[in-house]
Image (cartoon, grey):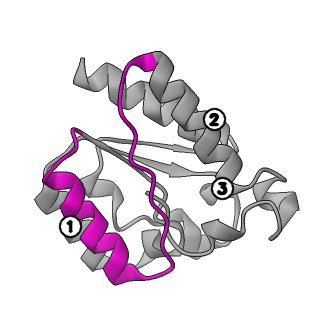
Amino acid sequence: MNGPNLDRLGTREREIYGAESLGDVESRLRELAGDLGVDLVFFQSNSEGDLVDAIWDAADGCDGIVINPAAYTHYSIAVRDALSGAGLPTVEVHISNVHDREEFRSRSVVAPACTGGIWGLGTAGYDLALRALVQMLA
């Protein structure tokens, strides 16, 4: 799952987020999911409510979540509560090193509802998160 502005990967702030598009990330993750023998549902929205709905949909049909809540990381109690309520193993991902940027980015209100987190490793963090989630579920 991907939050706001991640649909602009590859075109926005390339010095921070890189040149890879979200479509590129999705293609790579679908290939990895196939190699790992798991199904992948890929989702992105700029709307907080849509992200909350997607979390609840996952609770009804998925075994775990990899999420980059983007800006919602820092203030969305709604996303945090949905993750907590869903009760699924969840890995929080951030492309940039959120602890090496503006001070407000270092606080994640969703982290307490997540099993673990990966940040600062570029889009490769998604691959690592998927691998970690599959290993947790094994």
Q: Please indicate, yes or no, whether residue 90 appears anywhere in the rendered image.
A: yes
Q: What residue did someone put label 2 on?
A: 28
Identified by mark 2, the residue type is Arg
- Residue located beneath label 3 in the image: 22
Q: Earlier in the sequence, mark 2 or mark 1?
A: 2
Residue 45 magenta-drawn?
yes
**In the image, what residue type sits under mark 1?**
Ala
Label 2, label 1: how many angstroms apart (C-alpha)? 27 Å
Quadrant holding the C terminus = top left
Circle 1: element type: helix
The correct choice, above or below, for 49 with respect to 58 in the image is below
Up the image or down, 32 lies above or below 73; here it is above
Residue annotated with mark 1: 82
Which span is picked out in magenta? 36-63
Is 121 displayed left or right of 10 in the figure?
A: left
Cβ atoms at labels 1 and 3 below 8 Å apart = no
Residue 96 visible? The answer is: no
Where 3 sits versus 121, above or below?
below
Q: Where is residue 96 in the image (x, y as percent from the top left)?
A: 68, 54
